[in-house]
Image (cartoon, rainbow, N blue to C red):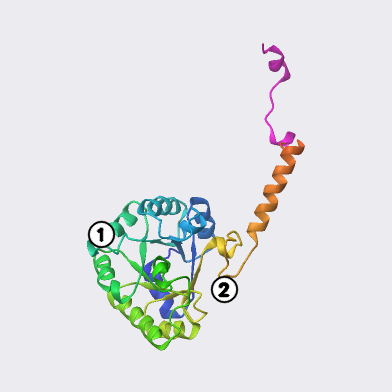
Amino acid sequence: MKNTVVTFKEAKEKGEKLTMLTAYDYSTAKLIDAAGINSILVGDSVGNVILGYEDTISVTMEDMIHHCAAVARGNKDCLLVCDMPFMSYQSSVYDAVVNAGRLMKEGRAHAVKLEGGVEYEETIRAIVNASIPVCAHIGLTPQSINAFGGFKVQGRGEKAAQKLLDDARAVERAGAFAVVLECVPAKLAERVSKELSIPTIGIGAGAGCDGQVLVYQDMLGMFTDFKPKFVKHFANVGEQMTAAFKAYDQEVKAGTFPAEEHTYKIDDSIIEKLY
């Protein structure tokens, strides 16, 4: 079934959980789509897991458009959400609408995601008014990592918890169709999820959210630079890949690959006539 912002709303109303995974290329998008996942997020985490940056700050609009378009070509039924990279929406509401439009037109996204709550209520409203669906993102917002002073759980104190609840109300009021809650105490995320009429998508926010999102390299054990507490390895694909690479290296160097079944034939008489 084709997933849309409407089916997301219906899932919330029915109490059905939603699934989201990241993807950054055609092949992975096809596999995720075939698995029946509800949504693909082309995250600015591309900076970490694909481009090798220490954070997401350096990711550009061109990076996001390039990867989103590749994913779009491999996707059939997932709701395709694309991150707005750092400084593509912070400078002005006008810039935000223009850049969101580029992700839709050039990247072929179905919706965009941006970080921030109350402070970006006007921005979200303007993008939504341009007929571009918006998924909000509050709690730990990686683009603000320098302001936070590191990757830290958000909303633990009373003031911080109230701020997160206010942010959630603001993005819903602005017209966001869903909101990602990242690194938020489980009970706070559950409170937010019960209050909002739009789906909450958790990452490090407990099972009380309406859905979950993970970076696919994290959940497959392919990214080993660091492992957040909220990540579960559903398969150790990274280990399998390394073993396969080693086996390939050994067989090539031993002269056992390629074998006869991997080669194409030619009549000996033709080889004998060559000069």
User: Residue sitting at 77 percent across and 38 percent down?
Assistant: 254
Up-down relation of residue 63 to residue 195 (above or below): above
User: Helix, strand or loop at disc 2?
Assistant: loop
Label 1 crowd (10 A; few <14 / some 14-19 / many >=20)? some
Along the polypeptide, which appears first: circle 1 or circle 2?
1
Disc 1 marks a residue whose amino acid type is Asp
Expressed as whole percent of the image width and height from the top left, the position of residue 12 reads 42, 78
Residue 95, disc: 1
Q: Residue furthest bottom?
A: 158
Horizontal arrangement in the rendering, residue 226 relative to residue 137 (left or right)? right
Task: Specify the label residue 229 is tagged with.
Answer: 2
Choose top left, top right, bottom left or bottom right for residue 255.
top right
SS at mark 1 in the image: helix
Query: Is 23 part of what is drawn in magenta?
Result: no
Q: Is residue 273 one of those drawn in magenta?
A: yes
Q: Is residue 17 visible?
A: yes
User: For this rendering, which residue is in front, 269 or 160?
Assistant: 160
Tell me: 1 left or right of 167: right
Separation of disc 1 and disc 2 at Cα?
35 Å
Within-10-Å neighbours for mark 2: few <14, some 14–19, many 20+: few
Q: Is residue 134 above or below residue 245?
A: below
User: Where is 193 relative to 249, above or below?
Assistant: below
Pinpoint residue 100: horizontal percent, then vertical percent. 31, 59
Given contact means CB atoms under 8 Å apart, are the residues at marks 1 and 2 in contact?
no
Q: Is residue 256 visible?
A: no
Return the residue nearer the eye: 149 or 134: 149
Tally the numbered discs.
2
Circle 2: residue type:
Lys
Q: Using residue 170 as the reference point, say whether residue 253 is left or right of it.
A: right
| Displayed quadrant of residue 132 | bottom left
Residue stretch in magenta: 259-275
Q: Residue at x 34, y 79 (%)?
A: 167
